[in-house]
Image: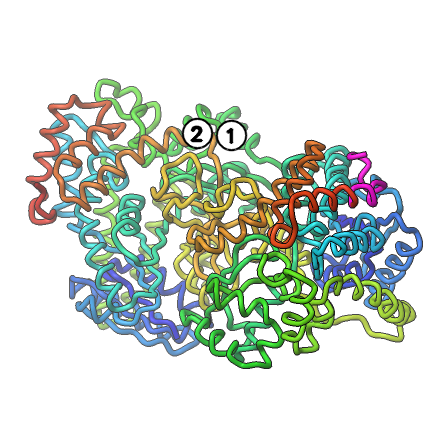
Amino acid sequence: MAKITFIGAGSTVFARNLLNDILGFPELADSTISLFDIDPERLKTSEIVANKIAKSVNGNPTIEATTDRRRALDGADYAICMIQVGGYKPSTVIDFEVPKKYGLRQTIADTLGIGGIFRGLRTIPVLLDMCRDMEELCPDVTFLQYVNPMAMNCWAINRATKIRTVGLCHSVQGTAGELARDIGVPYEEINYICAGINHMAFYLKFERNGEDLYPRIRQVIDEGRVPDWNRVRYEIFKRVGYFVTESSEHFSEYTPWFIKRDRPDLIERFNVPLDEYIRRCENQIAEWEGMRVALEDPDPQAIVRYEQRARKERLERIAAKDPVRAEQLRKEWEEAAQNHTVRHSGEYGSLIIHSMETGQPRVIYGNVANNGLIDNLPQGCCVEVPVLVDKNGLQPTKIGMLPPQLAAMMQTNINVQALTVEAALTQKREHIYHAAMLDPHTAAELDLDQIWSLVDDLIEAHSGWLPTYS
Amino acid sequence: MPKITFIGAGSVVFTRNLCSDLLLTPSLQASTISLMDIDPQRLAQARDLVQALIDRRGLAARVEATTDRREALRGADYVITTFQQGGLEAYALDIEIPQRYGIEQCVGDTLGPGGVFRALRTIPVLIEIGHELDQVAPNALLLNYVNPMAANCWAFERATGRPHVGLCHSVQGTSEMLAKWINVPYDEVVFRCAGINHQAFFLEFRRGTTDLYPLIWEAIQHSEIEGQEPVRIEMMKYFGYFVTESSGHASEYLPYFRKSAQQVNEELVPRFTDPVNSWYDFGRSGGYLRHCLERLEHAQADFDELIAGTKAPPTVRSHEYSSHIIEAIETNQPTRINGNVPNRNLIPNLPQGCCVEVPCLVDGNGIQPTPVHDYPPQLAALNRTNINVQELIVEAAINGKRDAIYHAVMLDPLTAAVSTLPRIHAMVSEMLEAQARWLPQFS
């Protein structure tokens, strides 16, 4: 049976979802799950959760927990990475607050932008170190990499190590689901091809039984039904002809068009949630804390009450944005409860493992090296394309040429990724400046002196979490 | 429910096998199967046979038969081509004329002078089908089984740009054989195979993460295994990888094995010691042509029994890809095949646009090839010697350039190894004259 290692297993909620998915497959229910985290307290919480899941499934999984990464990786068949280097505090807060002093505002700051660059710089060395352990302890491992900034992280791993890696996100399937609701077509009936780079992939085809569904997406605009929280992406669709995968709040900071310091009207008009990620992190931390307290409560009903409350709060949050989605989720949870199963999270991780172990072919969207997959993006950069998975492992499919306006937009992001990866792999400070200079949002807001000064301030503020740059 | 059209349905063995597969596929059991052939007698037999398969299982599928190709194609969702232009009569000329010039072809349907002329006869028909599809079934997918696969598909792509995939069973058959040689259950084997049709190579052959090539290296030491595949085993020894097409075929794509009738009969034929090699007469020149002539009689009895109901139809699907492809597209359940598709940077060290055989994902989005970026250079070089010939065939077929026919045969590795330029010229001229009625475009 496969050994599956969770790296950063203290991300309890995410780890729980993946564990439910994996152990919910009868063919995987006897797997060995090895949980690793550097934080013993968070690890302990995740271990309790994992053992609860293990008891509830139809099989005999082995659950181990360790703060020794090498032990966790030894002989692993799959390693799933969900770490956050530097955490919310201090690192994420610094990524938002220091740029703010220069008038540079961000929404999520985990992918691109000045925040994305520094998140990449502190994450890549940890990932490479992990991969070097894997080269020694489990060279045939399949590395399922969930950590942002996805494209930078995977590109660095592909350049510097031999570990077979796929970067995973849920934006492709998630957005397809959102569009399905917007146009009132059941998700299961939709057939799409999506390609590009992570968080900036576009649906090249969106069909039902050969019927192009794009006219229906256009109708959403024509009929004034664009959801308030999704104005940026519909605007981009209007301007480039294709719909993008990552959310409006993300997308607003990948281009120079939506956040401009002397244009507060844009923030209003496109409903751009500045500092959104800060709020999300605080919510997640509160949620985790509630879970920990409930799990440690001797009253077994405490966790049940916690789960009920957490779900209710989550539904309320979703309903505020997307009531149809909230209702759908509520029904799925209810159905699963009635069938004594757990709803599949929709994440690709468990599907990949299941396909590789059983041979059942599936298509997932993965982030892989561009070895001739998209002809008008640079060779070797990290692209998001349909990937066939079966016993042969991950087999990316050929896309060819993207519409030129989409490729051009992606190039502006790939520039930043390339320079950040270059900085991380060579430890040359100059490339950090270059990356920031080429960032579309930063370049639109600041002059070169400000950009250099901002980079200096951030290197200083993140000292301790960054290697030495010369 | 899809309409599936067979062009050349009078290839009754093939029609029977592929229709049996389709009718064993739950999601396709109410399909419309449209059979077309120019020979009304063989067409009627194919129809009776398919009708018998449907009746036997009480399925909702419908079969229709027509000699009108346009009608057969009208509204088709899938078109399966299995015709043989010029039939055995032309095929005999492909073998006999070159043999008089010292070109010892065993199968002669893929490369060599035989492959060149088969392509020249076939390509115009495939292109006509493509143009008719533009008019009467613009969304149809072509599943081409007609050889020479690579030249035909390449020309079809150049002339029509229509969706298509070229299908063969050499990858499945070879992988099954290798699994048997090393005693590993077939369903536990995983492999990665790529190259060009009939000359693709198993780049990986594994069980889980365990490389099975060491077991293959061991197996080929045994003389009874050597006697099954002497040519392919020799190729593996010198090129490092196992090739997909059988030893009879494989020997004629290379300059090394068939330099003279004497070398064929005294050195090569005695190495084929296993009865599995009988279908190409143990590597003898013209072996497959003789097999085709004999098979006609054998098959007849078989068809009669199936139609009469005295013989039970197959109960499991064969390893042919077509039913799996159509099922995957119709149900949007993914499957993996090895298909022949245009080389749009799929194998970077083979020419752009040529026809390559690579792993493809198939689902509701159609045929989606996967790139192979680590193709060993010696295999690419060997493929390129074959692709040279294919490229010149396509040039001749599409642009009507008579010179390109001569160039194609001049570049054929086997022909070049045994003949001279003046003799090649004379041979090609003789073949052009003898086959003029199937090659109106060059008269």
Position of residue B397 in the picture relative to residue B91 (left or right) = left
Image quarter for residue A382?
top left
- Where is residue B386? Give x, y as percent: 58, 50
Q: Chain of mark 2?
A: A
Q: Nearer the viewer, residue A249 or A456?
A: A456
Image quarter for residue A349?
bottom left
| Disc 2 packing (10 Å; few <14; some 14–19; many ≥20) | many
Secondary structure at numbered mark 2? helix
In the image, is residue B394 part of the stretch drawn in magenta? no
Which mark is on residue A220?
1
User: What residue did someone put label 2 on?
Assistant: A234
- Where is residue A289? Give x, y as percent: 20, 57
**Segment tinted magenta in the rendering:** B431-443
Which residue is located at x 44 percent, y 43 percent?
A373
Above or below, A157 relative to B215: above
Which residue is located at x 41 percent, y 55 percent?
A348
**Quarter containing the C terminus of chain A:** top left
